[in-house]
Image (cartoon, helix red, strand yellow):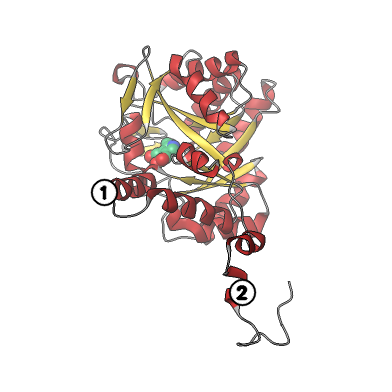
Amino acid sequence: MIKHFPKIEFPTTRMRRNRNVGWVRSLVRENTLTANDLIWPVFVIDGESKVESIVSMPGVERITVDLLVDNVGAAMDLGIRAIAIFPYVNPELKTPNGGEAVNPDNLVCRAVRAIRDSNLEVGVLCDVALDPFNSDGHDGLLKDGMILNDETIEILCEQAIVQAGAGCDIIAPSDMMDGRVGAIRDALDAKGFKDVIIMSYAAKYASAFYGPFRDAIGSGGALKGDKNTYQMDPANMNEALREVIMDISEGADMVMVKPGLPYMDVISQVKESFGMPTFVYNVSGEYAMVRGAGDQGWLDYDKAVIEILTGFKRAGADGILTYHALDAARLLNG
Ligand code: PBG
């Protein structure tokens, strides 16, 4: 980039020349947002032909697996090419060791199989972590008030294998245990899943903005304590870069920063430092804020959504997991 111009002074230079009309603004636009950049997170529940609303996420629903294929097909018609599936697991199936996570017929695996059976050409991402299945709401095994790292990894590897076996394309460890990316890569390879992609939740912060998600999957009420011993301190940047380096060296194909809006600087540093395919999770609390304010008429929801998602692209994100995906895609399609 040329850093020194001979003359960039007013009135020779008038910045507004390139802003005066729509066509020139389009010509000089530096970043574009398309529906292809979006990953749509979907919540699934047991049962048939049921749709449940989520109080803290107006406009987002939990749906049964039989409704999933049609809904995903409609999202694809809008240009969305990838989804993330999250289960609301029935409370009676939740145990202290999250055993349901490794059941090849659990809700997530059934949802993935339904998509695969439909032959829709959509990328399917699944979280690897125990929280939807664990009676204490934690991502790992809790013993005597401590989250066990290495014991948790063994279960996560099995969880990744059952999800890959169901046909999941992207395994996304969201648990923040140390060493899990390498262990999951080895476990997948050993079972012949060598082309399954790993998108690591590399820099995942201990955030207040996950609250509505925990309502959505029913893990919040039971959560014992907080996740501060495994998720990152929001104050830290250097630590985020070290987390990302470690995940890359363990074999992550893509890395993620989470949440999004309070961590724009982290997205941009991660992208600049490593040049990896870099994703951001525009999380449930961020959705709830914008949706809530929009519903109150306090801001223009449509414009705010496009501004936020474009901001992620500008910061360096290649793609965005967002509950605004369907609204955004509709807006982008005019
Ligand atoms: C679980 C997980 C969480 C989210 C994605 N996977 C919550 C948590 O860590 O407690 C949050 C997503 C959101 O808030 O939208 N490991």
Q: Where residue 245 is drawn, which disc sits there?
A: none
Q: Give SS at disc 1.
A: helix
Which residue matches tag 2? 17
Q: What residue sits 48% from the left and 51% below the top?
A: 306
Name the residue located 37 percent from the left edge and 14 percent from the top edge: 49
Q: Residue 101 in the image: x percent, y percent?
A: 45, 22
Residue 164: in sight, yes or no?
Answer: yes
Which residue is found at the position 55% from the left and 33% from the top? Answer: 78
State the CA–CA distance, disc 1 to disc 2: 37 Å
Please tell me whether residue 200 is drawn above or below residue 297 in the rendered image.
above
Looking at the image, is mark 1 or mark 2 earlier in the sequence? 2
- The amino acid marked with disc number 2 is Arg
At numbered mark 2, what does the secondary structure look like: helix, strand or loop? helix
From the viewer's perspective, is residue 22 above or below residue 84? Answer: below
Name which residue type carries label 1. Answer: Gln
Report the image quarter containing ligand 1: top left
Confirm or reject: label 2 Cβ below 8 Å from ligand 1.
Answer: no
Give 31 or 123, whichever is nearer the viewer.
31
Q: Where is residue 320? Give x, y as percent.
A: 53, 44
Q: Residue 55: image x %, image y %? A: 27, 35
- Report the side of 237 relative to 245 (left or right): left
Q: Nearer the viewer, residue 174 or 312?
A: 312
Label drawn at residue 296: 1
Q: Position of residue 282 (x, y in %)?
A: 46, 46
Callout in the foreground (1, 2): 2
Which of the 4 image quadrants contains residue 63? Answer: top left
The answer to whether residue 126 of the structure is visible from this angle is no
Where 148 sits versus 96, above or below? below
